[in-house]
Image (cartoon, rainbow, N blue to C red):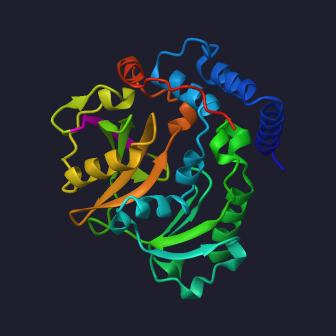
């Protein structure tokens, strides 16, 4: 085991110990490490500071259901939006339960208990199946709650789901449209384009896609304009319907062949510490988020 792997393991062990003592301690440790400052728990004002408050102090059980990439499907269906779901190919307790022979030539595998745990297969004949299983096994062992303090993930039992491969333009990665919703109303959309394994481009637009917003530091340095997605109106309507019970949620969608396809619901973008977001974004959206009364188990 190399020195970087040992350091990563030590960091995970330390974070788990902090989380067991108090999720607040883990939040403060992460905040100091990533921003150099203490998190102002008694007077949160920015978006991230208020999201951290919600993480620790508003633990509605519906958050866990909707953060789970499998159980959120029933929530979407209950809201009359089942037609926006990607086709489900299978649900697997472990990677060894996946019969790759039964899967189509193109598919997506997702672990249900975190973000970024995805295998996108564009050609099964070239897929290293054992490497895919190992990657899934690694993700399935990760305790996301104790790594980042995201308490709502603690009650999610990890699973793997298979979903249909989605494509809007042949040979190009899907654009992702992430709708920031406050108290049931969409405020803005973050367009994630040109996604690769190294990352993506992030650009913010207002809810009507009339104005580009100076919310992303990297976007400010780029000269690009993203076309309004054909499914824009359907995306906004669905995001607002799904977001009604929550002070804040980011509802993610794709626009595929002119129709909206649901992606996921995120309550803690970037684990509530987004250093690529401008002060304008942090302050504007922080003002939109009105903190509710505490709700604890």
Q: Is residue 152 above or below residue 105?
A: above
Closest to the observer, 7 or 247:
247
Rendered-image quadrant of the C terminus: top right
Q: Is residue 203 left or right of residue 291?
A: left
- Residue 79 in percent (x, y) is at 38, 58
Please give the range of residues in magenta.
200-207
- Residue 28 in percent (x, y) is at 69, 21
Closest to the observer, 146 or 290:
290
- Residue 205 in percent (x, y) is at 25, 36
Q: Main secondary structure of the magenta part?
A: strand
Q: Name the residue located 42 percent from the left edge and 42 percent from the top edge.
A: 250
- For residue 102, which quarter of the picture? bottom right
Q: Is residue 228 above or below residue 11?
A: below
Q: Is residue 287 left or right of residue 55?
A: left
Q: Is residue 132 above or below residue 57?
A: below
- Residue 114 in percent (x, y) is at 60, 51
């Amino acid at each position: 085991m190399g020195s970087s792997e040992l350091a990563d393991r030590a960091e995970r062990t330390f974070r788990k110990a902090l989380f067991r003592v108090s999720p607040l301690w883990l939040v403060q440790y992460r905040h100091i490490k990533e921003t150099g400052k203490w998190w102002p728990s008694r007077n949160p004002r920015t978006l991230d500071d208020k999201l951290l408050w919600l993480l620790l102090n508003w633990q509605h059980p519906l958050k866990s259901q909707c953060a789970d990439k499998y159980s959120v499907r029933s929530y979407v269906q209950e809201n009359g939006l089942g037609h926006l779901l990607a086709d489900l190919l299978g649900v697997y307790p472990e990677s060894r339960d996946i019969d790759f022979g039964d899967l189509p030539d193109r598919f997506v595998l997702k672990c249900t208990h975190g973000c970024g745990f995805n295998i996108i297969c564009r050609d099964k004949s070239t897929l290293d199946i054992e490497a895919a299983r190992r990657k899934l096994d690694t993700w399935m062992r990760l305790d996301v709650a104790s790594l980042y303090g995201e308490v709502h993930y603690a009650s999610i039992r990890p699973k793997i789901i298979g979903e249909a491969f989605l494509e809007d333009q042949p040979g190009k990665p899907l654009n992702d449209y992430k709708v920031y919703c406050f108290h049931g109303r969409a405020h803005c959309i973050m367009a994630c384009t040109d996604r690769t394994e190294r990352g993506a481009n992030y650009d913010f637009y207002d809810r009507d896609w009339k104005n580009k917003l100076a919310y992303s530091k990297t976007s400010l340095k780029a000269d690009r304009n993203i076309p309004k997605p054909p499914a824009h109106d359907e995306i906004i309507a669905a995001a607002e319907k799904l977001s009604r019970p929550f002070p804040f949620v980011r509802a993610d969608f794709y626009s595929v062949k002119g129709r909206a396809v649901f992606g996921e619901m995120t309550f803690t973008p970037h684990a509530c510490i987004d250093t690529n977001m401008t002060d304008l974004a942090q302050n504007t959206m922080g003002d939109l988020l009105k903190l509710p009364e505490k709700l604890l188990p």
